[in-house]
């Protein structure tokens, strides 16, 4: 008999994407899960920093255009 988390026809369940909610309790996560969250958040920090750099460059270009 199949467990509740198994498909009775043998099809693997799709992997649920990792999502981290700021402030969520961490005591139920394994070391591997914590590592996965750290990696996820570091990638998001990189994405945010890249967006910030692009916006700063755009602002500097606009400032230079309107000052001339």
Image: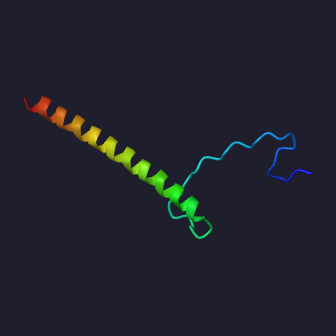
In the drawing, does residue 40 fall left or right of residue 53? right
Image quadrant holding the C terminus, namely top left
Question: Which residue occupies 24% across, 35% down?
Answer: 58
In the rendered image, the residue lying farthest to the right is 1
Query: Which of these two is toward me, 10 or 19?
Result: 10
Question: Which residue occupies 27% across, 42% down?
Answer: 53
In the drawing, does residue 28 fall left or right of residue 66? right
Query: Which of these two is toward me, 57 or 36?
Result: 36
In the rendered image, the residue lying farthest to the bottom is 27
Q: Position of residue 20 (x, y in %)?
A: 54, 55
Residue 31: image quadrant is bottom right
Q: Position of residue 30 (x, y in %)?
A: 60, 64
In the drawing, does residue 60 fall left or right of residue 43? left
- Rendered position, 7 above or below 24: above
Q: Position of residue 39 (x, y in %)?
A: 47, 53
Question: Which residue occupies 39% across, 51% down?
Answer: 45
Question: Which residue occupies 79% across, 39% down?
Answer: 11
Q: How is the image coloured?
A: rainbow
Query: Which of these two is toward me, 67 or 56?
Result: 56
Residue 54: image quadrant is top left
The mark total stands at: 0
Query: Which of these two is toward me, 67 or 46?
Result: 46
């Amino acid at each position: 008999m199949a467990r509740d988390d198994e498909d009775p026809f043998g099809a693997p369940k799709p992997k649920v994407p990792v999502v981290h909610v700021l402030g969520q309790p961490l005591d139920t996560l394994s070391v591997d899960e914590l590592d996965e969250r750290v990696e996820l958040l570091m990638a998001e920090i990189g994405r945010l920093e890249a967006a910030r750099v692009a916006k700063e460059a755009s602002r500097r270009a606009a400032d230079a255009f309107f000052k001339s």
